[in-house]
Image (spheres, rainbow, N blue to C red):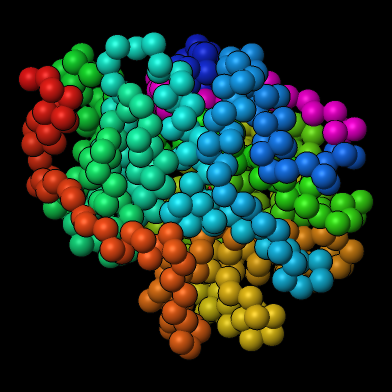
Amino acid sequence: MLYYSTNGQSASVSLKEAVIRGLAPDGGLFMPVSLPEIPASYFNSLNNKTLREISFYVVSAFLEDDIPRTVLSDIVDDALSFPIPLKEVEQGVSSLELYHGPTMAFKDVGARFMSRLMSYLYRNENKSLNVIVATSGDTGSAVASGFYDVEGINVFVLFPKSKVSPLQQKQITTWGGNIYPVEVNGSFDDCQKLAKQMLGDRELNGLLSLTSANSINIARLIPQSFYYFHAFARLENNTRNVVFSVPSGNLGNLTAGLMARAAGLPVHKFIASANINDVFPKFMETGQYKPFPSKQTISNAMDVGDPSNFVRINELMGSSLSNFRESIVSFSFSDQETSDAIQRVHAERDYIMDPHGAVAYLGLKKFLRENGPAVNGIFLETAHPAKFPETMNRIIDGFDDLPPQLQGVLNREEKFSSIGKDTPELKEYIMRVNQVS
Ligand SMILES: *Cc1c(COP(=O)(O)O)cnc(C)c1O
């Protein structure tokens, strides 16, 4: 299978090139030239299949031209080593809990799969692959955890000094081994700038192999389509229309869902649920895509003013607003509405949602009110509430959940390097780790 650039100015490339490059030379994002067609009969027999069985079937449909099936099977088993339960919260409203992985956010799925795929694609090269990633918190921990101990790969995680939560910092800095955390005396934007400078540095690229692991990589997107199939399989009565509500930031999760639907999964509608960063809901309403600087909210992983995967969705929709509206509805919610929903669902249903999942819950409820209740509604719960202790404590009195994954990390020792916003310093460090000069 070849991968083309959404900007249409670069030639199509192999899977390996798309994954190692991340971004196309013309600045576009890679998309598969065609999507697999999964036969309708497959969906009749899904109920007794496990997450891994379903994921293996779907990944084979996407990647078996490029990767042997035995390798795909190993990658799936290793990457999806945790459960993804579907829990009914109210009649017709279920939560897909994507947060049981090692860092307790759905980004574990994409990061674990990508790391193992990269390691396989890079297996015959004689140099290590150096992954450079800038983070404001969640991405860095998922990538560090996902790549830990993966052969032939070094990971440099750039995080801004004093600007990630103490828990997030622990999740980035306590790995050791092939994970090299770097504290940058600056902002997240400075980290991103440094990462871009490293990736574009001629001298460094001459000496070493460099790549990025951010969310635009197609290898993070493909595995995110698996859990839509899995969720469908877990429904008791999937003859009723199925709708998914997706808490959206960079729109990667939504893109993966739309790819699953294009490959044959019978989904009635997607609900793109946003916080007040409402570029996408506004686009759905007006047809105008107008990015703006992001605003801070309690669902901070969705504070995105110019969602990078919009161009991919536009491809899937053939740039037609009526196609967008046939497949997707989109709503935006305030922090107050989000907190109220968390409180209410906790009080009435004894179920605790995190702020991101709560935005998706609100989107689903609004859709059900407007379209009648005769559907199977699923909202994506993208992070464990315990990842946001300060916020959750303000909303629910006495909230003090601390699952073992997070407890474990708190007791481990932090190790990281510190640099200014200074390019030569980072470059030297990367060269030193790779033992070149
Ligand atoms: C990244 C993230 C999102 C947003 O997902 P996109 O694919 O960027 O739309 C939602 N919730 C959580 C917890 C996240 O970490």
Q: How many marks?
A: 0
Does residue 222 appear to the left or right of 140 in the view shown? right
Residue 265 screen position, x and y as percent: 79, 39
Q: Name the residue at 41% across, 47% down.
A: 142
Does residue 418 appear to the left or right of 335 in the view shown? left
User: What secondary structure is the magenta-colored segment mainly?
Assistant: loop
Q: Is residue 387 above or below residue 178?
A: below
Q: Quadrant of residue 411?
A: bottom left
Q: Name the residue at 58% across, 64% down.
A: 357
Does residue 278 appear to the left or right of 406 in the view shown? right
Residue 425 screen position, x and y as percent: 8, 36
Q: Quadrant of residue 65?
A: top right
- Residue 26 lies within the magenta run: yes
Q: Quadrant of residue 223?
A: top right
Q: Name the residue at 46% across, 87% down.
A: 398
Could you tell me if residue 325 is visible in this image? no
Q: Is residue 262 above or below residue 388?
A: above
Residue 377 screen position, x and y as percent: 77, 60
Foreground residue among 398 and 269: 398
Span colored in magenta: 20-42
Foreground residue among 231 and 204: 231
Could you tell me if residue 93 is visible in this image? yes
Q: Quadrant of the N terminus?
A: top right
Foreground residue among 286 and 101: 101
Residue 149 screen position, x and y as percent: 35, 35
Q: Name the residue at 19% across, 45% down.
A: 182
Q: Is residue 372 above or below residue 132?
A: below
Does residue 224 appear to the left or right of 105 in the view shown? right
- Residue 89 lies within the magenta run: no
Q: Quadrant of the C terminus?
A: top left
Foreground residue among 16 and 32: 16
